[in-house]
Amino acid sequence: MKAVIMAGGEGTRLRPITLGLPKPMVPLLGRPVMEHIIGLLKRHGITDICVTLQYMPEVVQSWFGDGAELGVRLTYFVEREPLGTAGSVKNCMSHLGEDDFLVISGDAVCDLDLSAAMGFHRASRADATLVLYRHPEPLEYGLVLTDDTGRVERFIEKPSWGQVFTNTVNTGIYLLTRRAMDRVPEGRACDFGKDLFPALLEEGAPLYGHIADGYWCDMGDCGAYLACTADALGGKVTMDMGLPQRGPGIWAAEELPGGITVVPPCWIGPGASIEEGSLLGPHAVVGPGAFVGRRSLVQRSVLMENAKVAERCTLYGTILCRGAAAQAGAVLNEGAVLGAEGMAGENSVLMERVKVWPGRKVPKGARLTASLVSGGGTGRACFGDGGVIRGTLEEELSPELLMTLGGALGAEGRLGLGYGGGECARMLARCAGCGAAAAGAAVLLHDGGCPSVGAWVAERYALPASLFVEQEGERIFLHFFDRRGLPLSRARQRKLEGALLRGEVRRASADGVGAWEHVTGTASACAADAARRARYAGASMTPVAVSVPGETPADRLLRSALEELGCVVLPRKAVGVPGFAAEYGGLRLAAWDEEGTVLPPERVLALVSLIELENGGGRVALPAGAPEAVRALAAVRGGEVLALDRDGSEAEEVYAALPWLRDGIFAAVRLCARLGQTGERLSTLAGRVPKFVVLRREVPLRRSRGEVMQDLAEAAGAQNGEGVRIQDRGGVVWLAPLSRRAALRVAVEAATLEDAEALCREYADRVRELDRQG
């Protein structure tokens, strides 16, 4: 069997290691990672290999040549224009012929049993077989669900935690037939995961997945690179260490000098020099020609070729690229990376995850808290539930990070910007605006005061992105919206996370810096628009008396919108008068009826859905975890309920067109427009929705979230959408992992509080039991 190594990757997430170096050429234990892949193929009897190239192809070609020195035959195919993964392999078909062949990435670290995978492929008579791997943290990968025979049932590309029904991930290793490749167009971009495999699945072609034994790791970023290195040293992956073993867990090209301490496992390359009093390891790599000075500490770190660590340095969890130098007394903390020929000055300190781009120098005695790159700082922040980034100024969020974030958002040319809650929010918002302007974007700074207006501004001005920075005491919340006023898609969230992780953004020239535009009166304009859109065309309306006792910016916006509608708004609760409270910056609404009965946000959502089903277009779209009661209402009225986590762009279009389904301000005016038009009481309207109670509980997990979700999905049957949804004893249970920590949310909807409590307790216990069984 022949093979194709895809080696065209630029490796942007691995920067600064890959600045000036193709990703397959990143050194792993003294040799390019692609050389280890060639060795794996050779061990499984594959010696005729095609190599697809795009980024810096001459570097790969000059190193490997025709492959004779490694005992293989290499044939190169260079893409002049990006063709996608399948398109690049299609480019090799003149060499591959009619026989089945294997495709593998040139930048992964693995020792999977390829022979077993080839046997499975032949036995199943598959058009295509995907080699799968059970991964404890599957969120960053494409998931593949198969039946008991291995036939592929479903793909989930780059899932959210709520979609993790399995921990079997797509490794990017495929066994393919000519029949499968005939479906790939000539000379056009085509991707295996996005195009070819979904098409084969839809056609009903024999598409299989084989879960392989062994080790696999996508060397995606600097942290993964260190983890792969540590796993290789620790024996978790089988590979040729390339050096004599001088002791248990110690590989060195030469005998170790006296006066040093080496804690295994460690790898010390040819020509490396280590001076007296130094401590290496565990999990330390000292590359060819590298130097470690007297009384220095190097642990869980990689020194690449000719890197130098002077005396009294401390390195833990760090990477020094080719020719980089840490001068005397320098301290490099976990995740720090010195690019090629970069330098950390004497007694300087690089804090966690700080990266220094090639050739840049950290001054003597400096304490570097942000990356030293071509034009920007860096940081690491992740989107949580609801598409919001949360943190504090001292920890997760910093001015430097907001500058980088603004630059990434500004890459699309325009950015809406608002803030509220305190001076910290104002400062961080302006940092983001400066980053966007520096990237050449026009910045529209509005005075809305709450996230609800931030969403409205994005829609009103058709902005590619809108950021609202909200402060509550020490906590900061970053809200993001697209041009429809919806939270950013998961794909865009990942793109932003990657930009923050890499710490690099585009910078405009001096005459290309973006302009700032200050827009005032946005809250009142938003309120007027909410009232206009909520009214029923051609219908008269009797003024409705309501109360809005809150004094937050969102409550003031709510009060203004209701007054625009013609309501009589009381500043405090009153007997016989319904009332509202804006929550989550106006994005959710809580209410109480004339008798004082509280209507929580999920019941309010059911009410506005009822109005849309009866007085609107008869269709609603709801997010994951929305009340099941809405589906019951739609079934009785012949309406339709779409799910955002299942029905794709059609559901998003409906959701975007009905702001009362996603915004508390619009929901309140829509409710009052109905009350004013029909003369109903809110309690009467609420009585038309089946009674239900929603309870939520969080269960901490010891096992991988993916493993627990897989067990739950298998027990519940086929799932399609976010989380696992189970009908049980007249109630609905929704189980979904939390994105920011190892825990699972149990949400129960039932007719009574007693039923909800019983189901919630039962399923929380089930989750704990599954967690213990792993």
Image (cartoon, helix red, strand yellow):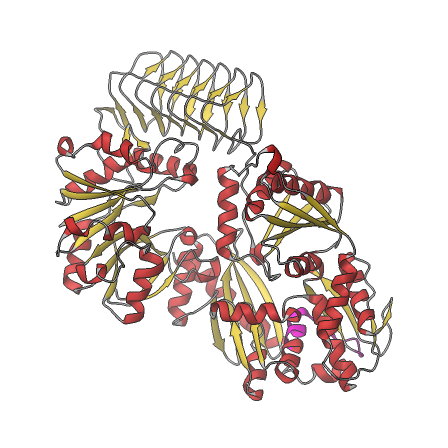
Residue at image location 34% in from the left, 47% down from the top: 82
Does residue 552 appear to the left or right of 728 in the view shown?
right
Residue at image location 59% in from the left, 67% down from the top: 656
Taking the view exactly as shown, the residue that stands out farthest to the front is 511
Is any part of residue 738 visible from this angle?
yes
Asked if residue 587 is among those painted magenta in the image, a careful observer would answer no
Q: Is residue 542 above or below residue 479?
A: below
Q: Quadrant of residue 756?
A: bottom right
Does residue 406 appear to the left or right of 127 in the view shown?
right
Q: At which x and y percent is residue 117? A: 20, 54
Does residue 639 appear to the left or right of 576 in the view shown?
left
Does residue 428 appear to the left or right of 57 in the view shown?
right
Q: Is residue 308 above or below residue 428?
A: above
Q: At which x and y percent is residue 518? A: 74, 48
Q: At which x and y percent is residue 183? A: 25, 62
Residue at image location 12% in from the left, 35% down from the top: 71
Of the pair 662 and 256, the residue shown nearer to us: 662
Which region of the structure is painted magenta?
A: 594-606
Asked if residue 603 is among those painted magenta in the image, a careful observer would answer yes
Is any part of residue 474 visible from this angle?
no
Of the pair 509 and 277, the residue shown nearer to us: 509
Q: In which quarter of the image is residue 515?
A: top right
Q: At which x and y percent is residue 740? A: 54, 51
Of the pair 284 and 588, the residue shown nearer to us: 588
Q: In this view, does 678 lie above or below 478?
A: below
